[in-house]
Image: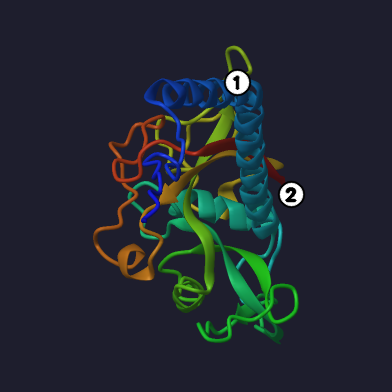
Amino acid sequence: MKKKVAVHKHANKKSGFTLVETAIAMGMVAVMISSFLVVFGPAIKGIEKSLSAKEADRLTSALELELTTIKNDDVYSSPIEKTYYWVRFTHEDSNFPVLVYQYRGDPDSVRTDGTLNPYPYNASNPGTPGVDYVIQTSVRRLNDTVDNSKIQAELVPGVLEGKVYYVKLLQLRTNSTDGSLEIPSNPWHVYNAGGASYTGDFSQFVDPVLAFRAQFYEVKPPLWSYINSASFSVSDSGDADSDPDALGKPVATKNMAVIR
């Protein structure tokens, strides 16, 4: 006689979450995420601002160091003479825009001007930072016979670190009425303080201090093929306070000065 075996159809069925339970769990996760953003959101924004401030300080410090240093291949006799010509010829309708960027420098290969040759990029052997290469901040004038080949070598992908910035330099003069600093109506010229006469060369500039405003603009894309092409333009409408048409608004602005 055969024995009947009772089979429980639902004995092996696994229990799961119901739709209501899933909805409640998703709601709890949403509340937790919202609470996290409320608490830590301002802190994250603060970190972003501090990084931006750090970047701005790095840019202005690099520009200040460049203008106050006379290198072996410079044609200037003093920092104030160098600043004078950089202010006159490095923005607006000029062909010598100032560029600031970082690149990987080879500590074992130093140029005659004291800067480092680029560390050759190798995808299979990128090198160790601080050992094989060091990050250098470079401030150079595009289309300068001394700087152009160096810019091209330093903007190679894998050698360039981060972004490239264009620096617009504008002289600042003292307003004779209220003593405030202002940009001359013809911003690509350099004037003696308190006078409206244009100084044709540095020998006519007699002031002990040359004050100027440095405006930094991000260059996109940060490629030599673009920067060295006709597509890269820093010209504007000619108004002292207007922004270059092609580069938008400055990412950082700082008033600076060089003393004799």
Vertical position of residue 198 compared to residue 65: above or below: above
Q: Is residue 80 left or right of residue 13?
A: right
Residue at the image position 35 percent from the left and 63 percent from the top? 227
Q: Position of residue 119 (x, y in %)?
A: 60, 81
Q: Residue 109 or 259: which is nearer the viewer?
A: 109
Rendered image quadrant of residue 213: top right
Q: Which residue is mark 1?
A: 35
Q: Which residue is mark 2?
A: 260
Q: How is the image coloured?
A: rainbow
Q: Is residue 226 left or right of residue 183?
A: left
Vertical position of residue 55 compared to residue 66: above or below: above
Residue at the image position 70 percent from the left and 82 percent from the top? 132
Q: Residue 232 or 14: which is nearer the viewer?
A: 14
Vertical position of residue 187 compared to residue 116: above or below: above
Q: Position of residue 197 (x, y in %)?
A: 48, 36
Please tell me how crowded label 2 is: few (under 14), some (14-19), or many (20+) other residues with Cα within 10 Å. Answer: few
Rendered image quadrant of residue 39: top right
Rendered image quadrant of residue 210: top right
Secondary structure of residue under mark 2? loop
Residue 110 makes an appearance in the image: yes
- The answer to whether the residues at label 1 and label 2 have Cβ atoms under 8 Å apart is no
Q: Which residue extends farthest front? A: 1
Q: Residue 206 or 188: which is nearer the viewer?
A: 188
Question: Which amino acid, by three-letter code, is at mark 2?
Answer: Arg
Earlier sequence position, callout 1 versus callout 2: 1
Q: Position of residue 194 (x, y in %)?
A: 58, 27
